[in-house]
Image (spheres, coloured by chain):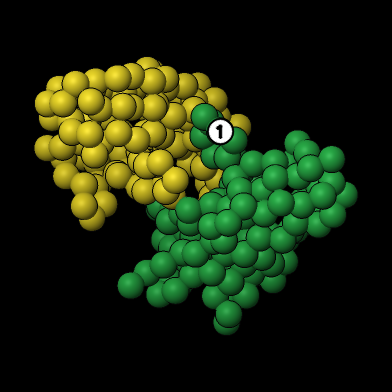
Amino acid sequence: SAVISQKPSRDICQRGTSLTIQCQVDSQVTMMFWYRQQPGQSLTLIATANQGSEATYESGFVIDKFPISRPNLTFSTLTVSNMSPEDSSIYLCSVEWDRGRQETQYFGPGTRLLVL
Amino acid sequence: SQKIEQNSEALNIQEGKTATLTCNYTNYSPAYLQWYRQDPGRGPVFLLLIRENEKEKRKERLKVTFDTTLKQSLFHITASQPADSATYLCALGTDSWGKLQFGAGTQVVVTP
């Protein structure tokens, strides 16, 4: 299995500022995913981040608002830009593991963001 | 429109009984379906995967069924324990790139 850590675990930010969330994996993985989970809601996929290529964003999410970096096979960052209270959410990264046997995803613990 | 529906009301169940959760979907053709467990303040933890050509999967006290005609999956926890109390999420995999679409989850509360 993969062990995933995220930093920060939580933060309180002011409207209009930006926050960068880090995701570190203890093994090399090809695909990493960023999700958002708003209070009482399901996880919504923001984007897929592959090393060496631009992230692929889902409908409703744009690079200017959620720029993603994937500098190597164990690390990724998601930036929440120009934040508003509507961005208050839990942000989770996940990695796909054991591809070829079953499509299992392992999730980080999440970053709990509150925007005032 | 595409939907994944799970019971929004919490399922309260007595220890030792079987908990059954449903996941219904519309306008999807999933290649596989997964179930995850999520505890408060934690990320989801993978439990089981079932593919479109499989009817049933078991893992210890867990059982999943998948009916692509009814567009439904059932998730059973047999001999439930208080430690099984959590929110359970179903997720549909519709392509080969690992992208998942999640339901909102059902909270299970097992009382002694």
Q: Which chain identifier belongs to the yellow chain? A: A
B8 lies above or below A35 = below
The front one of B7 and B72 is: B7
B33 lies above or below A99 = below
* Residue A55 horizontal/vertical position (percent): 24, 41
Q: Report which colour depicts chain B.
A: green
Q: In the rendered structure, the residue with mark 1 lies on which chain?
A: B
Could you tell me if residue A20 is visible in this image?
A: yes
Name the residue beneath numbered marker 1: B40
The front one of B108 and B78 is: B108
Q: Is residue A114 left or right of residue B36?
A: left
Q: Residue at x 58, y 53 (%)?
A: B106
Quarter of the rendering containing residue A40: top left
Q: Secondary structure at mark 1?
A: loop
* Residue A82 horizontal/vertical position (percent): 13, 30
The front one of A67 and A99 is: A67
Q: Amino acid at mark 1?
A: Pro
Q: Residue at x 54, y 61 (%)?
A: B6
B80 lies above or below A21 = below
Quarter of the image that includes the N terminus of chain A: top right
